[in-house]
Image (spheres, grey):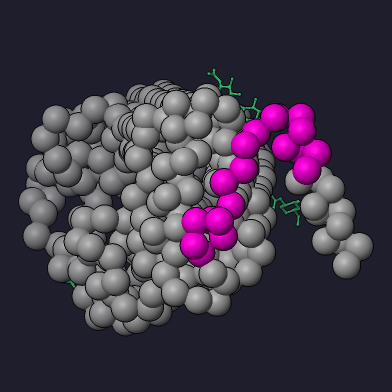
């Protein structure tokens, strides 16, 4: 009871200091434990969006069923928050959301905040079953909705929420400028296919910090046309690690420039920090990518540049990647590898990696000496070097 009073006090305090107007979905017909709140949420959003004051769409304590929702701007409100203090739960059917929609899709909004300490549960188990057979390494995947599709947004903050059991990705963002993801808890089982934590594409200035990712695919993945990503103080695992790419699959891709991954922990992940570009790829480039102070605990290929990426076979491996990689550093990467190859630097024969720096690496493999693979890279070394890498 005391905690509840405190929460309400804090909430009221926030209202007073921001002078925000609150649009409680209960006042728009939502019922906890009841029917689908799609309409109520949409109507509360419309009212908040057209208000001229800073506005809060409030999902209060309780469990609410949400089939799907598409929240569209531009909004008149100078700032808008979706504050979920409860638990929003999807329908379990893989086809519950219309084709090409996301479970929660938000587009064309500036100064949006998604917060509230609540949970978004995508109830993905039935969808995963349908993809477990093929989807790992073929392209024959069923497309299921992501928990959040966040597109064409400026000045986005996503904080203090849990995203759970997405049918596909937890968050996919594109055409987003200036976003911060903070204090998130992202969870799905290790064997849930395609449940990437956050996939970033076509975006600028994205920070992800102080968050934990336990999922069945990449914790964070970064696609083409992205500049200025700062990932710090996250934990990742289980999952497939933190990945830039895959790049070079499509024509007309644009560069990735400026990615920092620092002060983070990976444990029991299939891969560590990875840059991957397709064999026989389309042209592109990626530069200024830095990985620093990262603990690896039982991680597969902790350091990995893979320019022969071709997970489902059928690539012409004699045609090297045409993605130019440059200015890459791995510093202070330490811990244990679950695979003999702790460091894999496989760069393109056509465009060898330029400006690779490796400093203070200490990676052990339980089953023997940790190994490295090196091709078409000529790294500069400093500090401790285990395994001892020789790239000539
Ligand atoms: C980024 O967005 C945040 C949150 O809306 C805002 O406080 C900050 O000023 C923005 N930064 C820039 C450079 O626009
Ligand atoms: C990344 O974000 C952290 C925390 O906000 C900050 O301290 C650091 O300077 C940023 N790094 C870069 C390269 O922007
Ligand atoms: C990483 O692990 C270390 C040692 O267990 C811990 O002190 C640190 O807080 C962890 N960092 C994150 C971001 O989880
Ligand atoms: C997919 O991976 C499975 C298990 O690793 C393997 O048996 C199968 O041959 C692969 N399929 C293709 C098309 O590569």
Q: Nearer the viewer, residue 80 or 335?
A: 80
Picture layout, residue 190 above or below residue 250 = below
Residue pictured at 64% horizontal, 59% vertical: 60
Name the one closer to the observer, 101 or 22. Answer: 22
The image quadrant of residue 124 is bottom left
**Where does residue 201 sit, x and y in percent of width and height?**
33, 38
- Residue 321's x, y, as percent? 18, 39
Q: What stretch is highlighted in magenta?
A: 12-30
| Residue 187 visible here | no
**Drawn side of residue 193 relative to residue 83, left or right:** left
- Name the foreground residue: 217 vs 323: 217
* Coordinates of residue 114 in the picture (x, y in percent): 55, 45
User: Which quadrant is home to the N terminus?
Assistant: bottom right
Q: Is residue 280 left or right of residue 53?
A: left
Residue at 76% over, 29% down: 17
Q: Is residue 111 left or right of residue 69?
A: right
Ligand 1 rendered quadrant: top right
Q: Quadrant of residue 282?
A: top left
The residue shown at (14%, 30%) is 252
Q: The C terminus lies in which quarter of the figure?
A: top left
Q: Does the magenta stretch include residue 50?
A: no
> Is 319 drawn above or below residue 145 in the view shown?
above
Q: Which residue is drawn at 58% across and 66% down?
A: 87
Q: Can residue 38 be seen in this view?
A: yes
| In the image, residue 92 above or below residue 285 | below
Residue 98: percent from left, percent from top: 23, 63
């Amino acid at each position: 009871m005391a905690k509840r009073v405190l929460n309400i006090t804090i909430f009221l305090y926030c209202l007073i200091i921001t002078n925000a107007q609150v649009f409680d979905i209960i006042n728009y017909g939502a019922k906890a434990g009841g029917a689908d709140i799609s309409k109520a949420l949409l109507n509360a959003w419309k009212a908040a969006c057209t208000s001229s004051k800073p506005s809060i769409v409030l999902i209060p304590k309780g469990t609410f069923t949400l089939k799907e929702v598409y929240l569209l701007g531009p909004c008149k409100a100078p700032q808008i928050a979706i504050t979920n203090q409860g638990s929003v739960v999807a329908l379990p059917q893989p086809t519950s959301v219309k084709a090409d929609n996301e479970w929660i899709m938000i587009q064309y909004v500036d100064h949006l905040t998604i917060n509230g300490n609540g949970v978004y549960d995508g109830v993905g188990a039935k969808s995963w079953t349908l993809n477990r057979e093929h989807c790992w390494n073929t392209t024959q995947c069923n497309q299921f909705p992501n928990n959040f599709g966040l597109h064409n947004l400026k000045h986005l903050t996503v904080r203090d929420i849990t995203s759970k059991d997405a049918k596909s990705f937890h968050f996919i963002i594109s055409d987003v400028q200036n976003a911060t993801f903070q204090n998130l808890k992202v969870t799905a089982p290790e064997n849930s296919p395609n449940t990437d934590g956050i996939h970033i594409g076509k975006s600028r200035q994205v920070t992800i910090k102080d968050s934990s990712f336990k999922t069945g695919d990449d914790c964070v993945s970064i696609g083409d046309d992205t500049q200025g990503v700062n990932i710090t103080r996250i934990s990742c695992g289980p999952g497939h690690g933190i990945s830039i790419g895959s790049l070079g699959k499509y024509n007309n891709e644009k560069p990735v420039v400026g990615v920092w991954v620092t002060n983070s922990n990976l444990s029991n992940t299939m891969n560590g920090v990875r840059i991957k570009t397709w064999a026989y790829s389309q042209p592109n480039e990626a530069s200024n990518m830095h990985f620093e102070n990262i603990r690896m605990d039982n991680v597969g290929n902790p350091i990995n540049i893979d320019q022969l990426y071709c997970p489902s076979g059928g690539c012409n491996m004699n045609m090297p990647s045409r993605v130019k990689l440059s200015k890459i550093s791995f510093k202070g990467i330490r811990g244990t590898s679950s695979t003999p190859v702790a460091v894999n630097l496989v760069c393109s024969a056509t465009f060898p990696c330029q400006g690779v720096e490796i400093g203070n690496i200490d990676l052990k493999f339980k089953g023997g000496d940790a190994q490295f693979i090196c091709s078409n890279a000529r790294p500069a070394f400093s500090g401790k070097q285990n395994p001892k890498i020789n790239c000539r």
